[in-house]
Image (tube, rainbow, N blue to C red):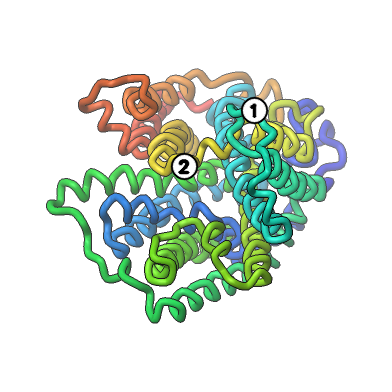
Amino acid sequence: MDTIKDVTSQGFDASLINPDIAPVAKDQQNWKAISFFSLWVGMAVNIPAYMIAASLIDGGMSWKQAMWTVLLGNLIVFVPMSLSGHAGTKYGIPFPVFARASFGIKGSHIPSFLRAIVACGWFGIQTWIGGAAIYTIVLIVWPGIADAPTMMPDWVGVSLVQFACFMVFWSMNIWLIWKGINSIRVLEHMAAPFLILCGLGLLAWAYQGADGFGPMLTATSKFTDSADFWNLFWPSLTAMVGFWATLTLNISDFTRYARNQRAQVVGQLSGLPSTMTFFAFIGVAVTSATIIIFGEAIWDPVVLVRRFESHWLVVFSMIAVIIATISTNAAANVVGPANAFSNMMPSKIDFRKGGYITGIIGIVMMPWKLIADPSGYIFTWLIGYSALLGPVIGIILVDYFLIRKTELDVTDLYRIDGRYAGVNPRAIIALIMGVVPNIPGFLANIGVYSGSGFFVDLYNYAWFIGLGIAGSVYYLIMRNQVR
């Protein structure tokens, strides 16, 4: 995708630009609302989204309370998502370049790196899930493989066959990276209707097999008083927001291709909250039906389809899981870090190389351990990284809307000696101020700190606290210091 011909003739420094992070030309901004709707269907239909209500119901919520929590969280996250996407559409720039305005040319590496590392973790998690689907197909063909020796060190935690399936799915993602970002858009358009039909099909199977949806949809809340409910609700709401906190930062990587602001706003509003809530409901309804059909609640759809009697149905279901997972991975967990790594060394790292780096880090992080514990998944992983990303999005939005009034000098965003040169120390101060209050709670959740009290409890609101403090501090120290 060659968006520029001669960067020097446009006033850009060649060391700060390459075709993958250059401003998108107006004639290439052709994504309509349906494009963003399809993008979100492709990203939101995934196994973690299916299972996202599991911990809420296990914690004591009724299914309705769980669904409202999921819906509210996604409506909340839509607001900064659409606001962050504004700059992408107006100026055709990706997130790492957008971050240069607030953090500075060199300082932008900090939010870019934070976004990239989180995405690498998500890339690994989704790749592990896709590998598990391939492993299920392998078990159908060679059932005895489950009893084979692990042939891997104990500290790895998986068998050689499981790891091999993980690497097969990993290779599929790497191939998509090699094909480029346009292939991701095509994939999302093709996958969206297929994934919706698969979800409805699974819902119909559950309803017919259980003569209804089972006891979970008739059960009431387990909470005896409202205090217990709120103690679960607030950290859960933060986790719901944290689920897509990554995309609130780098959504401009996609909205830079939008035809206009209406396309990105309407497309995201119609695609994100509705799909996440509906797919979470499918997870609850189907799991409720499994209590009647199999005598136990089966939250993991990969485990569930292994119970199907028809091997062909299992294979088809696993193919659906593979398509759902790769469509999520490609858009949500590759584009952002690939552009972030490219931003660090534009002359040497392009989109493909950035994607390859993402894939390698995704392996090293051993994602099967990140999701081994459901409580750790929410309180350590989701809330933990939301404590980092909340302050970043707070700074970026305050800078763009309140400090600069949505006016950016695109040429200076690509110049070493322009108004955004170097590091903006005020953004760094605001970032630190937004992160610090959440550190005690994070340390308590990972077992490093055994204390309790106000600052530990504050961690339940990590994303909101970080965004509010960092955004406020940044505004106070920047309001008369426009760079």
Task: Answer yes or no: is residue 23 visible.
Answer: no
Which mark, residue 401? 2
Residue 303 x %, y %: 53, 57
Q: Is residue 129 above or below residue 408?
A: below
Q: Is residue 134 left or right of residue 46?
A: right
What residue is shown at x 81% (from left), y 45% (from top)? 178
Q: Nearer the viewer, residue 471 or 388?
A: 388
Q: Secondary structure at mark 1?
A: loop
**Which three-letter amino acid code belongs to the residue tagged 2?**
Phe
Q: Nearer the viewer, residue 483 or 169?
A: 169
Task: Answer yes or no: is residue 458 visible.
Answer: yes
Q: Is residue 80 left or right of residue 233?
A: right
Instruction: Answer whether labels 1 and 2 touch (C-beta < 8 Å).
Output: no
Q: Is residue 444 left or right of residue 246?
A: left
Residue 205 x %, y %: 50, 76
Q: Nearer the viewer, residue 407 or 391?
A: 391
Few, some or many residues within 10 Å of mark 1 (<14, 14–19, 20+): few
Residue 211 x %, y %: 39, 81
Question: Mark 1, mark 2: which one is toward the viewer?
Answer: 1
What residue is shown at x 74% (from left), y 26% (from top)? 345
**Which three-letter amino acid code belongs to the residue tagged 1?**
Pro
Q: Is residue 458 left or right of residue 296?
A: left
Identify the residue under disc 1. 153
Q: Quadrant of residue 190?
A: bottom right
Residue 7 x %, y %: 82, 35
- Split into 4 quadrants, where in the image is the C terminus? top right
Which mark, residue 208? none
What residue is shown at x 30% (from left), y 64% (from top)? 64
